[in-house]
Image (cartoon, grey):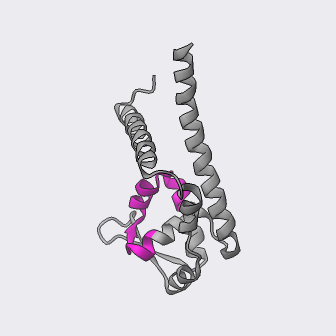
Amino acid sequence: MVESRKSADRDLVGAWAKRCYFAGRAVMDSVLRPYDLGSVQWYVLYQLATVGPTMQRDLVRLLAIERATMTGIVATLVRKGLVEQEADRVDQRQKLLRITAAGATLWGELPDLSFIRSVAFDGVDDAEIAVAVRVLQTATERLENLLQKGTAS
C-alpha cells in the first residue's frame, strides 16, 4: 500500500509540473494575444532583445523545440517585420537572427510578464521552491541522459 502511494505521488509530480507549465503558458498567451504574439515568439524576441543576435540553431536548443517548429516561428516573425534573418558567412544554411527596429519598438511596448511568476509563487516558501526545482531538475537530467544513451526501454 505504501509503495503504491509513493508511485501515485511520483505520477502526480509530473502531472502537476505539466499543468503548471500549461497554465502559465495560457496566461502568457492571453496577455500576448492583443500584440499578435504567442509565447514562443515572445521567447525568441526576449532572447534577441536582451542577449542580441543569436543563431537560429541555438534557439532551437535553448527553447527545446523542433527545428521545423522554429523555422515556422521565425518565418512568422520575419513576415511581421520583427526579426531579420541573415545567412551565416561560413555556413549559408545556418541563420543568424536579430531583432529589427519594429521588433525593438514592439518589445518596448509589451507588458512585463513577471507577474505570472509572482501570481504562481509569491507566498510559497523559498525552501519549498528550491526542493521543487531540485526534484524537477534531477528528473529532467535523468530523462535527458536516458535519451542520450538511446535507451527508451
> Residue drawn 48% across and 70% down?
46
Between 27 and 80, which is closer to the camera in this rendering? 27
Between 130 and 107, which is closer to the camera in this rendering? 130
The magenta-colored residue range is 47-71
Task: Please determine whether, in this image, residue 137 is positioned above or below residue 113.
Answer: above
On the rendered image, what quadrant is the N terminus found in? top right
Residue 122 drawn at (x, y percent): 53, 59
> Residue drawn 33% across and 64% down?
91
Task: Please determine whether, in this image, residue 84 is positioned above or below residue 146.
Answer: below
Q: Residue furthest left?
A: 90
Residue 8 drawn at (x, y percent): 58, 25
Q: Residue furthest top?
A: 1
> Residue drawn 69% across and 65% down?
30
Is 62 in the magenta? yes
Task: Please determine whether, in this image, residue 115 is positioned above or below residue 12.
Answer: below
On the rendered image, what quadrant is the C terminus found in? top left
